[in-house]
Amino acid sequence: MSQFDRVIIADWSASGTRSPARPSPDAIWIGVTDANGTTTTYHRSRALAEAALSILLTGQDRVFLGFDFPMAYPAGFAARLTGEPRAQSVWRWLSDHITDAPDNKNNRFEVAATMNRATGGPFWGRPAHLDLPDLPATKTADYPAIGLPERRHVETLIPRAQPVWKLYTTGAAGSQGLMGQPLIHRLSQRADTAVWPFDPPAKRITVAEVYPSLLSAAVMADPAPIKDEAQVRLLSRAIFRAAPMLDTPEIAREEGWIYGAGHAAALLAALA
């Protein structure tokens, strides 16, 4: 029997414009699995997706809500930016500084430049036309010199995961993190919600970071024309069926953790 009554997986987007009306890749997809089966939906903006999630979170059932973006940064960054060595303080800071319009227009690159000025310059990646001297277009940071790790501990276990500092070009998840963490801040204010592993998963709703590419073998074999749709469908189903995967090292309380890291075989087996 599943630990959760419902598993929701959201493939997020940092796009600065609305996604096409026709379901498309590189947009927001949400997969939901419960005792009745699995469904997927497509959303053209973060505002519309958040409204849909609000509806999905109503009720009294036990819910797992996974997002495919980094919810924290390597050890030392939070204290350098906010004075507190807690991911929650970064969520709050980003909630105060990120602007996100209903049409997806946002200021994520400008905010990243501000963060670089305050923390030594770990972020990189931006469109070439943006004039942001404090945010380089390519990786120039010497991470040992600035005193911040390039990768979180969990990313050393999943080498194909991109560093959280990378904001632009293929595979980058850093921009989704900037745009998603204000939402995590809002969710964390709910009395019925715990954000794991920063909080014990002891409330009705457990929010966590996920990495759909843990199921890359199953996704590649899936006939769905849009990879993002297959990812949320398969991962929601796997987590619903699999045993809990809540083991983490102590550093995860600051850096966060990817649910299922180190357990890809068990997730794939749950799909069989």
Image (cartoon, rainbow, N blue to C red):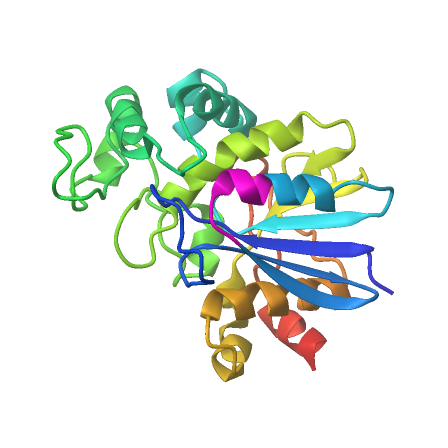
Rendered view: 187 above or below 176? above
Q: Residue at x 35, y 35 (%)?
A: 105
Image coordinates for residue 203, horizontal then vertical, percent: 80, 37
Q: Residue at x 33, y 33 (%)?
A: 108
Rendered view: 69 above or below 101? below
Image coordinates for residue 260, horizontal then vertical, percent: 61, 59
Specify start and end residues of the magenta stretch as a single range. Answer: 43-50
The answer to which quarter of the image holds residue 3 is: bottom right
The answer to which quarter of the image holds residue 196 is: top right
Q: Nearer the viewer, residue 27 or 193?
A: 27
Query: Does any portion of residue 71 appear in the rendered image?
Result: no
Q: Is residue 49 left or right of residue 203?
A: left
Work out which quarter of the rendered image holds the C terminus and state it.
Answer: bottom right
Q: Is residue 210 left or right of residue 159?
A: right
Image coordinates for residue 156, horizontal then vertical, percent: 43, 55
Q: Residue at x 39, y 46 (%)?
A: 18
Q: Residue furthest front?
A: 21
- Please tell me whether residue 6 belongs to the stretch shown in magenta: no
Image coordinates for residue 71, horizontal then vertical, percent: 51, 40
Numbered marks: total? 0
